[in-house]
Amino acid sequence: MIRSIIPLMVTVLFFMEPVFSLFSPITFGDELFTLVPRFVFIFLIFIAAYGRKKDAIVYGIIFGLLYDIFYIDIIGLYAVLYPIISLIAVWVIRLIHRHIVTVGLLALLLIAFLEFLSYGFASLISLTTISFQEFAKGRLIPTIIANSLFVMMFGWFFNKVLEEKVIRRLNDMM
Amino acid sequence: MPRFFSNKRLILMLVGVIVLVALISFSLRDRHNASLPERIVKDVVGFGQTVFSKPAQFITGTIGNIDGILNTYEENKILKERLNEYASVQAELREVKIENNEFRQIIDKQEDLNEYNPIHATVISRNPDQWEEKVIIDKGKKHGVQKNMAVITARGLIGKIVVVTDYHSTVELLSTENRNFRVSAVIRSGTSDDQSAFGLIEGFDRERGELIMRRIDVDYEIEAGEKVISSGLGGIFPKGLPIGEVTEISTDDYGLTKMVYIRPAAQFSMLDHVMVAKRTSVTVDGTDGDGTVSTEGEGGS
């Protein structure tokens, strides 16, 4: 059961994303704010930091592909963005001190990067016409805030699960 | 990192990029017809999604109920006042319906653009990266849903079906920025068809949160506050689905036609139960469907 806890968690997070996006967009005062849940992506970054690097990329490809087929109808967008950004996370994590706060911040930074890329792609194929300022104010910042709440609530939990898994694997090897 | 650009990796990367570009352009060209593997994945993921969205909807429903109970007293007072009005309207409606039926029999008219069979569906998810306004519902081809059908809530039209698989379908909401999304609509000002202004709803003003209706003849007199309904002339939607209310009238870019802003009757966030309106009379592929999309794409925009 413990063996399959990571795929199980990714699956649960994958299905939680659209449930939370039913609440979006929220109106606050007169403004409209779009919140994009990136739960799977955050977990991928945590896997890249604490778990096996290969896992992060494989899960990135699989769930990116499912995301593309089920929601976006453009195959090959998130199926590429997820693993590539996980790979970047793997590189960056080698350079910095691996602490839960830094990993959390890295996840948020990479979410911003992902949002930039997806905004670029969406305006390239003219899915959207919003200006960059509108994107930053109405989508990027609210998304970062919402996802930082998620990281704060579940970061330690991801950390614990993944570290336990690594320790177990080390024990098995010995 | 010289190791990264070794020959093998470089070739692998190039092949990857080529495959990626091919995949994206392939799926972009024909986004609204899912291939067999896509359909299978969609249905399987859809079942999983249903498992997760049902409890979530139960929770939001419960919160809604508690909220409702807290407001009961105030609402009850207002509703009581409305009830008297309702009884007389009800009586009048009955009379009108009977009369209408009689007239129909006299002129021997069987089909009615107004009539539709509702297919009840539940929204199981919304497109999480929200570049497009799409939701997925738990009814598909097996339940009689077809592409381009109108989707409504109790308050009014919300969108139309864009992708259908066997057990699920994707709805594009009216609040989309997609200019190829058209609904043929009519503004009811008087009581007869002569006084109604016909036009097409295309586009959504995100800042105002209002729909834009274009291509209305300048001769028509339109006033703010008038009701907008679907006209049924687009070929697929039934007639008479409420869409919204006129808020502002202006002229189009070239001054040849009128352009009207419409406050939508339905809400596009927090959707749960929707109906797919399956029109009973014959459907044709007109402005509601793909009928004009290809020609428009070449000529305009």
Image (tube, coloured by chain):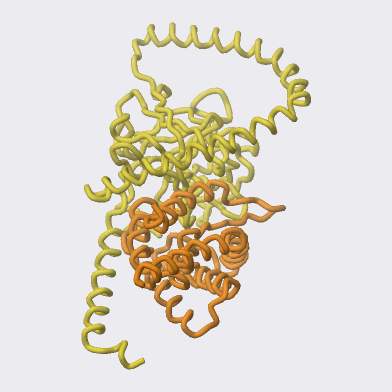
Position of residue B204 in the picture relative to residue B134 (left or right): right
Is residue A77 visible in the rendered structure shown here?
no
Q: Residue at x 47, y 73 (%)?
A: A49
- Relative placement, left or right, of B86 versus B169 is right
Which chain's colour is orange? Answer: A
In percent of the image, x 40 and y 60: which residue is there? B301
Can you give x and y, in whole percent of width and height, for residue B154 in the image? 53, 29
Q: Residue B90: horizontal and vertical position, in percent?
A: 60, 12
Q: Name the residue rendered at 57%, 40% in the picture.
A: B267
- In the image, B37: left or right of A105? left
Q: Position of residue B280 (x, y in %)?
A: 34, 23
Q: Position of residue B174 (x, y in %)?
A: 48, 44
- Quarter of the image with the N terminus of chain B is bottom left
Asked if residue B265 is positioned above or below residue B214 in the image, the reply reads above
Q: Residue furthest bottom?
A: B2
Q: Is residue A102 above or below residue B85?
A: below
For the colour yellow, the matching chain is B
